Amino acid sequence: MTKRGKEMRRDAVPTMLAPDTVLGPDADEVARAVFERWHQIAERLEPVIGARGVDVLFGRALHLTTKRFPWLATSAALGNSAETLKQLAARFESQEASVATEAGAALLLTFTELLANMIGEPLTVRLLGSLWKQDTPHSRLERQA
Amino acid sequence: MNEKVAIRRLATGVPGLDTILGGGLPEYSFNLIAGPPGCGKTTLAHQIMFALATPERPALFITVLGEPPLKMLRYQQQFSFFDTDRIGTSIRFINLSDEVATGDLEQVLARITSEVEATSPALVVVDSFRAVMTEAHQQPASHLQHFVGQLGVRLSAWQATTFLIGEYLSDTENHPIFTVADGLLSLKQSVHRNSMVRKIQVLKMRGQPTSPGVHTFRITGTGIEIFPAAVVPDDSGALAERRTMPRSQHRLTTGVPALDAMLGGGLPAGYSLLVAGPSGSGKTILATGFLSEGVRLGEPGVMVAFEQTPSQSRSPTIDDMVRAGHIGLINTRSPDLSIDEIVHQLITLIHQMKAKRVVIDSLSGFELAVAPTFREDFRESLFRMVASLSGLGVTVLMTSELEDRYTDLRFSPYGSAFLTDAIIVQRYVEIDSHLRRVMAVVKVRDSVHSNEIRQFSVVDGKVAIGDPVLDFQGLLGGRPQRTPDNGSAPPEPA
């Protein structure tokens, strides 16, 4: 049986962002990976739930994740604006790679969980599921091996 | 050769909607769904979309402000027709709130155009169009008219069947969009006292005869179900033909042989019979016997009961027959019932059971059960119901609570006596300081029948007809007197 919904997200998101000793990512690379993934998610969702819908959920996900990672707190609740993302990227880059990875995974997981709470797991998988199956540094290496 | 275009009619997947539309939704039509917030516009559009969309003929659902898409997706999933597996393959959701917020209608049109060109949808829904109109109010009216015209023309040209959903609150609102649209569905919620009834009306549908008038609908877990108002067929052309047709000679026995004799040999098949009488006189017992007799003869029946409280339980006989599957039972206490909904349930059950006999016990309960908003039209609706049932060829027995009045002779409080083919009246009379029941056959259309007033009693749950009350007169006036030639003194009034 294939893994669906929650399990799939829980497994896939950290894997996508995990520090890879072979590739040797640093915090900059983690930040890039987090926001690349985030842009993909937003790109999928904006046509369906609108930029405002994505903004609201992102703002809430960020607020919840900040409790565990206070350094994520931004000065203004700007949602998914370019300004917020720029500020956030800078914060990720200033962290240890492992901490940045953990925070990035927590942020994306919290966001997808909020989405799943609103529109249900099957529709979330329907809209975002293929992202979990995309290439990751790990899967690329596995294929090369 | 002159070959006219044939318009394909799409099955909407909404029970009852195809009927009131006059056979389905015309393909490539440009339709409006209008109504106040919460009346079910988005649900109706979703239900139609899920019924029609396929990977080859996909649907595009464009949300424009109005209900936030997140919430719409959340709530619409509660309906069983919402199939998430079809999102992305057969159905695409697109949000245009950013384009609409600019107030630039050309930009909105361009985005809709590009989305439609990209996916070639067979069905396009724009929800809600009022948002577009509100934004456009900042602009000259001609811009909006141009936009609406363009949208209508383009969507028709792209061979898409289109729905625009809008909160058009006023009946008198005159807008170019009403002219451009091929179809106009108006949804309403009517609140009367503590009941709320949903109503739908097809105000316009080009090219096909729709069912006129207001139809009720209900929203349940499976979505919208419409109960088309029963239509009494116009048979003025068929009248001559009918006259030449021999009337069915078959008569149904009531389970009370003496009553059958009073009716002139039983109740003619296809007739409607009104049994009117005061509380406790034995109407339900007579009705139950009518159904039991049917079951005995292999004629299934349907009973429509309107018990207001569980304590007013049905007789064990009815329960046994229902359990055995010999008769169907409709018993409802819903406060927002429409007569059309009951008729719809009843007709479905009649077909299902292949029923020959129908009992409605009682009209008084029925009147209490329907939503207050329908009570004003109760008599008219009753007429349509009796006509519909008569069209099915079933024989109907209806009971009616009759207040004992001794100053006038009334058979039902609805003026419904003329609607029925036969009438039996039951009364209490006082004879020799005893309260006795009497029964008389008042009318059997086109048939001889007894005109006697017979005493009757209920023995072991069955009606037992006694002798005619020959010695008294003035029974129905409540003050019977012994007939003078009998020689004895009249009983003293109580």
Image: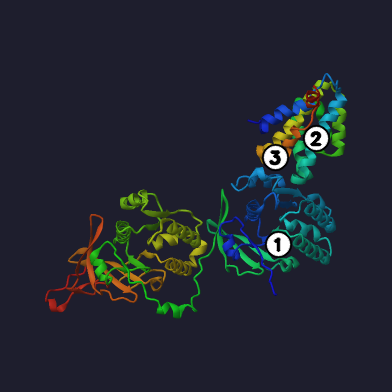
Q: Which residue appears farthest toward the bottom when viewing the image?
A: B240
Could you say where residue B211 lies in the image, as x and y percent from the top left?
A: 57, 67
Labels 3 and 2 within one chain: yes
The secondary structure type at the circle numbered 1 is: loop
* Amino acid type, mark 2: Trp
User: Does any portion of residue B361 appear in the rendered image?
Assistant: no
Q: Which residue appears farthest toward the front when viewing the image?
A: B1
- The numbered disc on residue B28 is 1
Read off the residue under disc 2. A38
| Residues packed near mark 2 inside 10 Å, few (<14), some (14 to 19) or many (20 plus) | some
| Residues packed near mark 3 inside 10 Å, few (<14), some (14 to 19) or many (20 plus) | some
**Which residue: 43% across, 77% down?**
B242
Considering depth in this image, is B354 or B166 the residue closer to the camera?
Answer: B354
- The numbered disc on residue B12 is none
Q: Quadrant of the N terminus of chain B?
A: bottom right
Chain assignment, label 3: A
Q: Earlier in the sequence, mark 3 or mark 2?
A: 2
- Tell me whether circle 3 and circle 2 mark residues in contact (CB < 8 Å): no
Could you say where residue B214 lies in the image, as x and y percent from the top left?
A: 57, 65
Q: Quadrant of the C terminus of chain B?
A: bottom left
Read off the residue under disc 3. A126
Considering depth in this image, is B150 or B55 the residue closer to the camera?
Answer: B55
